[in-house]
Image: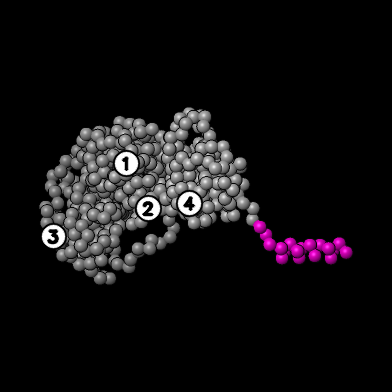
Amino acid sequence: MKHKLFTVLLGLLLVSPVYAAPPANDDLANALKIVLPYSHTQKTIDATTEASEVFPPCTFSEGSVWYQYTPKKDENVVFDTLGSDYDTVLAIWSGDEHPLTEIACNDNSLQTTQHSQINTTLQKNTRYFISVTGFNKETGTLNFNAKALESLDNDDLSGAIDIGGETFSYTQETTKASTELKEPPSKCGKDGNTTVWFQYTPRTESTMVLDTLGSNYDTVLSIWKGAKHPLAELTCNDDRDEETIQSQLSMTFRANSTYYIKINLLNKTEDAEQTDILVFNATPYEPDSTVPPDSTDTPEPTNPLDLIGAIGMGIDAEGNPIETTASFSGTITTETGLSGNDLTINLTDNIDIYVTVQVDNAHIDETADILMVVAIPINDKTVIYYMREGTAWEEWPGEIALLAAAEKTVTLPETLTRTLFQGNLNQLPATSYIFYMGYRLKNGHIIFNGPEPIRLKVQ
C-alpha cells in the first residue's frame, strides 16, 4: 500500500506545473541593503510590479527588483547594470512606500548598449531605493553594481594614480578634467581636450590589458614614457572595435620602468547635463588558445629581418642572432578611429603607421641609422621587399649589406618614435603589407621589431 501511495504521489509531482518564485527582492519591502562598493548577480525571471508602483518615467518597463542605500556622508555614487544579458532600466527613488518619488532614471547609458547607468549626488543619512526593471517586460540575468566616484586628483601628470598590482579598477567623474600646457595629443585622438593620468611601474616584466569599458563617453587610451611633458607616446587605441566607442589595448611592460597611461575624452557632447563617467580597468593578459579569425595563408617573409625572438630582435652584420632588451610598439591608426598593429583597411583609407622604440639601455646615446622595411607577399612563393632610403621607398634585394637608411647618424634617446607611412595606398596593389623598423649601430648590429611587425591587409 505504501509503495502504491508513493507511486501516485510521484506521478502527481511529475505532471503538476512548477511555478518559479519571484526574486527575493521583488517587492520594495524586501529591498536588499547595499554597502559600497557593491556588486550583485541574480535572475529576474518572474519579477513583478506591485500595486501603486510608479513606472520609471524614462521608458516603458516592468518587472522590478529593488535595492536600498543610506549613505553616511554626502557622496557621488554611480549605479549600473553592466554585464546584464537583457535590456535594463535603472531608476533611483525617495520615499518610504509606493508611490515613490523619482530622482533619476536611465534606459541605455549609450546608444550602442542596452545597459543602464546613473550617477548622482546622494545626501547623508537619507534612504534611497534603486529599482531595476526590464524594457518592454524583458528579464534575464542582472548584474547590478554600485560604487562611489573617486575624486579628480589625477587631472595632471604629477597626480597620476599608481595602478599597483595585477588587477586594478577605478571609476571617476571626469567632466571637469583639463589639459596641461605642453601636454601632447595622442595620435589616436588629436581632438581630445580633457585628460586623466595613471602610472604603472611593474616589478617584473608583465603583459597587461587596459580598457575603459563601462565608461559613458568616447575614450582614447594611450601609453607614454618620459618624466615630464612633452612625453613620448608608445601606443594608443581609440575604439576597441567598430561597435564600441570605448578603448582597449594590451602591452608588455618592462620591469622597474615607469609608464604613464592617459585617457582622454573624444568628441565632447553638447549636452550640458551630461556627466562624464570614466571606468578604467587593468588586468593581466591571458593568451587566447584559439586561432585568430583573420589568419591568412599568405607566405611569411624569410629574409634576415624575419627571425623570431623576444620583444625585440637583434642580428649582427652576418645575420646571426644577438640578444637585446629593446622593445617595439607599432601602431596603425585610421581616420575612422580604428587602431592596432594588425588591421584590414580599404585602398582609399587614410592611415598613419608609426613605431615607438624603447631603446636597449646599452645603446642609449649611441649613434645609429634608422631602418625601415616593408614586405609585400605577391603569391605563395614570392615576397618583394622595399627599404626606405631617405624619404623614398626603393626595392631591396634582401642582402643586409645593401640595406639603406631612412635616417643616418641619429643619437639614440631612451624612447624613439618614427612615422613609417602617412596617407593611403590607392596607387598600390590590394594585398598584405608587413612593416619593420629598427636601428643599425656603427658595428653593424641591427635591432628591429622582428617578432611583432606591423601587419596591414588592404582590400
Image x and y of residue 209, in percent: 39, 47
Q: Quadrant of the N terminus?
A: bottom right
Image x and y of residue 246, in percent: 35, 49
Examine the rendering and report whether any part of residue 101 can be seen: yes
Label number found at residue 111 = 2
Residue 8 counted in the magenta span: yes
171 sits to left or right of 437: right
Provide the residue designation for mark 1.
272
The answer to which of marks 4 and 2 sits earlier in the sequence is: 4
410 sits to left or right of 237: left
Label 4 element class: strand
CA gap, disc 1 to disc 3?
53 Å
The answer to which of marks 1 and 2 sits earlier in the sequence is: 2
The answer to which of marks 4 and 1 sits earlier in the sequence is: 4
Amino acid type of the residue that numbered disc 1 sits on in the rendered structure = Ala
Whether pointer 4 and pointer 2 mark residues with C-beta atoms closer than 8 Å, the reply is no
- Residue segment shown in magenta: 1-19
CA gap, disc 4 to disc 3?
58 Å
Label 2 element class: loop
- The crowding category of the residue bearing disc 3, from other C-alpha atoms within 10 Å (few below 14, some 14 to 19, many at least 20), is some
Predominant secondary structure, magenta span: helix
Q: Residue at x 37, y 38 (%)?
A: 173
Q: Nearer the viewer, mark 4 or mark 1?
A: 1
The quarter of the displayed image where residue 332 is located = bottom left
Provide the residue designation for mark 4.
88
Amino acid type of the residue that numbered disc 2 sits on in the rendered structure = Gln
Image x and y of residue 134, in percent: 50, 53
The answer to which of marks 1 and 3 sits earlier in the sequence is: 1
Provide the residue designation for mark 3.
394
Q: Residue at x 31, y 36 (%)?
A: 177
